[in-house]
Amino acid sequence: MNLQRIADKLGIAVDRLQSLQDTKISESSWPEPQLLRFDKEISGIEAGTVIFRNGEIVWGYPSIRRPLMLEAAIKRHFIDSVAVEEKMNGHNVRITSIDGDVVALTRGGFVCPYSTEVATRLLPEDIFEEKPNLVLCAEMVGPENPYVSQDVYPTDSIDLYLFDVAQKNQRGTHGVHKTHEIAEDFGLKKTAFFGEFPRETAHKRIKEIVIKLGRQGREGVVLKDPENRVAPLKYTSSESNCNDLAIAFSHYNDYALDFFLSRAVREGFQSVEWQESVEERRERARRIGESILLPLTETIKNKQQGEIIMQRIKIRVKSLATARGFEYHLRRCGIRAIFDQPLPDDDGYTIGITKIIMSTNDKTEALLNGEMW
């Protein structure tokens, strides 16, 4: 690697890059291509930023902030109008071509073998031939998503929806209009676009959209400046918050406390801003309470009966090498997973996977045996 050239692209001094390489940047040689990965934000460089062996850089996707009082935040943050898209509930990937091969990067900057195979299968072959520097920012969703399994989307497997585009070696993304242009040009699916609304009244339409999405079991919306002048914001439905809480309380010792607190606080601010009646607020409280107590007690009872706290998922692959690679990928991410025997399925294989929820398993067993909290 030409460190001086890479440092110039990153906008930092070469000696700073060298010191980071020794202490703060992780190296990965598997799967190919070899890369350097920023595990956390350093020197203004987003976490998940990747430097490939050939010197090309894919910047990390910036984290999106979240308003709690929607109307006030929109008026404070946006300039004149707000473009509203669906926030889909899956896993975020950045897909590009490195030395002619498609690569799908997770949010943290790992090459995921399974996501790479899915992207290779779903994307048109000519997209990176025509646009070799393109980076597709997409959400992978569906029941065969091994990270976030959801059956509310129109697929019985896994699908890919474009939500932004970027360029290798360039910071930032290109926004709503360019994303939809790329999607139309190459026949890609894209996240649902609900329209552009004036800043002064956008919160009213967004409330209507979020309520409807919540009733459908969907997550929420992303708010963008149509000209990409300010960073996007995200806003989720009550149902999504409660679904997150239900999953987290099922695996209560494997989540950070802020995960629980932030979703409960969102519910309080949303209830107040939407000026809910006593009945509506009681219904929200019931929904939150059930999302906490029911999955938690189910976990405790299951462990009391000697069961292993686990999550069952399923993937479909064309190559057994992909499955073996994905098994190793989960292991390096600290996830203990047991893979079933592959079952031939059409032109590939279906594989059931048991993800063991280790920390909650151990903690629940200890507490049931009298350990103090």
Image (tube, helix red, strand yellow):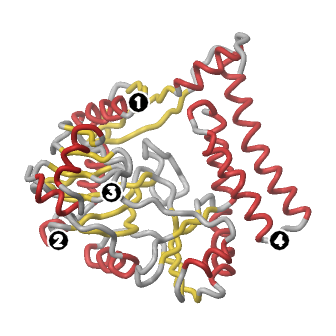
Callout 3 crowding tier (Cα within 10 Å): few <14, some 14–19, many ≥20 = some
Separation of disc 3 and disc 1 at Cα? 24 Å
Q: CA distance from mark 2 to mark 4?
A: 49 Å
- Give the labeled residue for mark 1: 334
Q: Which of the numbered marks, if any, corresponds to residue 45?
A: 3
3 or 1: tag closer to the N-terminus: 3
Residue marked by disc 2: 131
Above/below status of 61 relative to 311: below
Image position, residue 136 (x, y; %): 30, 64
* Mark closer to the observer (2, 4): 4
> Foreground: 200 or 9?
9
- Which type of secondary structure does the marked residue at label 1 adopt? loop
Q: Nearer the viewer, mark 2 or mark 1?
A: 1
Q: Badge 2 local density, few (<14 within 10 Å), some, or many (20+)?
A: few
Please rate how many residues cluster around mark 4, counting C-alpha atoms within 10 Å: few if below 14, some from 14 to 19, many from 20. Answer: few
Image side of residue 150 versus residue 205, left or right: left
Q: Where is residue 94 drawn, in percent x and y?
A: 31, 57
Residue closest to the far top: 369
Residue 275 marker: 4
- Determine the image quadrant of residue 34: top left
The residues tagged by marks 2 and 1 sit, at their Cα atoms, a distance apart of 35 Å
Which residue type does callout 3 highlight?
A: Ile
Q: Quick one: label 1, few (<14), some, or many (20+) residues within 10 Å?
A: few
Report how far apart the C-alphas of labels 3 and 2 lie in the structure. 25 Å
Residue at (58% x, 18% y) in the render: 362
Query: Which residue shows up at 38% across the image and 51% down it?
Result: 41
3 vs 1, front mark: 3
Tell me where residue 186 sits by quadrant: bottom left
| Distance from the alpha carbon under mark 4 to that under mark 1 | 43 Å
x%, y% of residue 190?
A: 40, 70
- Marked residue nearer the N-terminal end (3 or 4): 3
